[in-house]
Image (cartoon, rainbow, N blue to C red):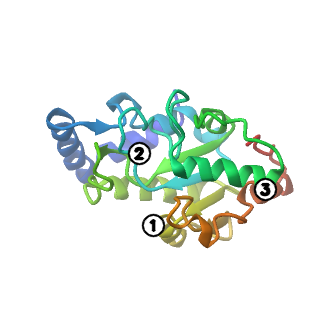
Amino acid sequence: MNSWNKIIEEEKSKEYYKNLKNEIDIRYENSTVFPPKNKIFNAFSKTPLENLKVVILGQDPYHGKGQAQGLSFSTPKEIKNPPSMQNILKEIYDDLGKTSICLDGDLTPWAEQGVLLLNTILTVQEALPKSHHNLGWEIFTDNIIKYISQNCNNVVFILWGGPAIAKSKIIDKKRHHILTAPHPSPLSSYRGFFGSKHFSKTNEILKSVGKEPISW
């Protein structure tokens, strides 16, 4: 049994989540919603709590057909890399001097090494970014972040863009490491995402606390 299950089941028993689930079920029935329902919690399936080393926080899933797979920033390998993913791959090359192991944009290999690819909102309506904002997902993911903050040690939180950076206030900075930069989207990447060197910095932190670095 995945170690997240107990934590997620506890959230599901709360009133806010019951309201959220009812609303999400209706939206899946009446509109096109991503990711597929069976992949909403994919980030937790791919990165068990006991393997957790890094959290990369996104905003909400990609809203184009076939793109979202329940992992922040990641797309299935047969899908063309979205602009944010192209910029992430460019920064990896510039930072590490070598190409990413995830050139196809599918970040599952990162997740399997202990990188939790978490969006703050876990569902979205087709072609309508942030359409599931304020339904309750933010409460759920805040509670997950607080759980990690209080029960784990030396996790590297990579926060890109304003909404992700705002979560630093619920992370215990004495126990964890926080890296922040503008979002990798083309709108903001040139304001400091490029050159942030978060991939090498993360590996330096992991090595310094005796953890295996990530093969990016």
Asked whether the viewer can see residue 206, the reply is: no
Q: Quadrant of residue 208?
A: bottom right
Instruction: Mark 2: give few (<14), some (14-19) or many (20+) Cα within 10 Å.
Output: many
Check disc 3 and give the amino acid type: Asp
| 109 is higher (above) or lower (below) than 10 | above
Which residue position is annotated with label 2?
A: 62
Label 2 vs 3, first from the N-terminus: 2
| Residue ID at (68%, 70%) | 174
Q: Horizontal placement of 87 versus 11: left or right?
A: right
Q: Horizontal placement of 18 versus 144: left or right?
A: left
Viewer-nearest residue: 37 or 151: 37
Tag 3 secondary structure:
helix
Check disc 2 and give the amino acid type: Tyr
| 174 is higher (above) or lower (below) than 202 | below
Label 3 vs 1, first from the N-terminus: 3
| 42 is higher (above) or lower (below) than 138 | above
Which residue position is annotated with label 1?
A: 163
